[in-house]
Amino acid sequence: MTLLEKTSTSPDPEDRSMAIRETLRNAIIDRRLAPGTKLSEAEVGALFDVSRTVARAALQMLTFEGLVKTERNRGAFVSHPSPEEARQIFASRRLIEPGIVTAAVERITRDDIARFREQLIEEERYINDRGPAARRAEIKASGDFHLMLASVAGNAILQRFMDELVARSSLVIALYGRSGVSSCGHSEHFAILDLIERGDAKRAADLMLHHIDHIEADLDLQPKQGVALRDVLATG
Ligand SMILES: [Zn+2]
């Protein structure tokens, strides 16, 4: 069972819940677990060899992050975010990320910049490979760029917001992204990093806003239902 490979075997129930959450979270974000998949406490407990209480705690954390939806009497399922939720996620990112970029300009070190460049080269590799596994890896790698910036910015609370927003964005991009389009404009990541390196906080923050607009514009968030018949059939 590939889900179990990276799960810690610490005896502490809280550690176990955290490790299960992490494993399920990765599986949801890279879509090994599709939206709508049932996540029963009993099954999660059995798979990871933990009590239902430990499994429930893990599912509650994922519910809190918006990756899992819990329905009364039906249990927990992998979320299927609506187009409206998707828009709210990107609206939140537009509020938070320019501030993160500004803080990162103040705090970033030479070593950080070198790490970022390595990360971007890795990302480029996935973009050039067109298979579905590479596509999943690319969505994850492009989210990692934003998370690395949040960690450099040095605000633990903002970093937690970003963990949630990037996780939810990855799910939305996997669901609504047009195939063949990079989830994050890759050259924009390089350009943002260049501006940060030069200490140009204003332009780096502006470009980040522009970049988030681009990611959202690449999604197909038009409602598929509710089209008025008369509009479709109107002859003039
Ligand atoms: Zn990006």
Image (spheres, rainbow, N blue to C red):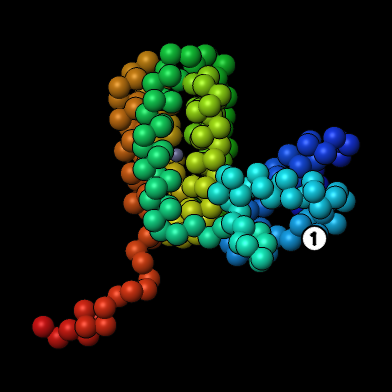
Residue 160's spot in the image, x, y percent? 55, 32
The image shows a total of numbered marks equal to: 1
Residue 101's spot in the image, x, y percent? 41, 25
The crowd level at tag 1 (other Cα within 10 Å; few <14, some 14-19, many 20+) is some
Give the quadrant of the C terminus: bottom left
Q: Is residue 167 left or right of residue 27?
A: left
Q: Residue at x 43, y 19 (%)?
A: 103
For the residue pair 139 and 103, the one nearer the viewer reads as 103
Residue 203's spot in the image, x, y percent? 30, 25
Please identify the quarter of the rendering in which residue 77 is found. bottom right
Any part of residue 181 in sight: no
Q: Residue at x 51, y 34 (%)?
A: 161
- In the image, residue 75 above or below residue 232: above
Give the quadrant of the N terminus: bottom right
Q: Residue at x 31, y 38 (%)?
A: 210
For the residue pair 210 and 94, the one nearer the viewer reads as 94
Does dot 1 land on a helix, a strand or a loop?
Answer: helix
Residue named by callout 1: 43
User: Which amino acid type corresponds to the residue marked 1 in the rendered image?
Assistant: Glu
